[in-house]
Amino acid sequence: MSEAGRVILLTAEGCAFCERAKALLDELAADYRLEVTTVDIASPEGARLALANRLLFPPGILLDGALLSYGRPSAGRLRSEFERRLGAKRPGPADGPVTVG
């Protein structure tokens, strides 16, 4: 199994797309073994990360320190990028049944 990806979600207060990005990343975290940290873009760390990655507007999604996405998040694009960059594959019908427990 691949190593966990470190994701930083840069958000802003009152940002509807930021709330959607957070919910989407929470959904994808188990499938792709993501460690998600949320950082306010108005904080010193958030401002530094936004400037360093030339983030135009929130939400910004960084994977292992590199800008992956900003603005309205796309579930399909995030899935594709996580599979490509992390070598992770979401379990599907061809993989057989998933057992729990």
Image (spheres, rainbow, N blue to C red):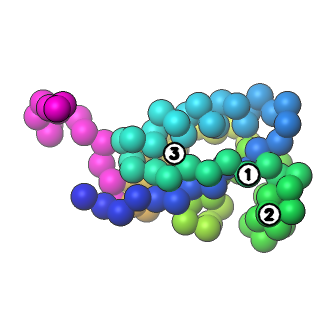
Q: Nearer the viewer, residue 49 or 79?
A: 49
Residue 56, can we see it? no
**Magenta segment boundaries in residue numbering:** 87-101
Q: Earlier in the sequence, mark 2 or mark 1?
A: 1
Assign the C terminus to one quadrant of the image: top left
Which of the 4 quarters of the picture holds residue 62? bottom right
Q: Is residue 100 above or below residue 52?
A: above
Query: Is disc 2 surrounded by few (<14), some (14 to 19) or many (20+) residues within 10 Å?
Result: few
| Mark in front: 1 vs 3 | 1
Which element type, helix, strand or loop, lies under badge 1?
A: strand
Q: Earlier in the sequence, mark 3 or mark 2?
A: 2
Query: Is disc 1 surrounded by few (<14), some (14 to 19) or many (20+) residues within 10 Å?
Result: some
| Left or right: residue 98 compared with residue 73 | left
Residue 47 shown in magenta: no
For image coordinates 80% across by 63% down, the residue present is 45
Tell me the CA gap for discs 1 and 3: 19 Å
For image coordinates 81% across by 33% down, the residue present is 15
Three-letter amino acid code at the position of disc 3? Leu
Q: Decide: marks 2, 1 in contact (CB < 8 A)?
A: yes
Residue 88 shown in magenta: yes
- Point out residue 51 in the picture as x, y percentages from the top left corner: 83, 66
Q: Which residue is mark 3?
A: 78
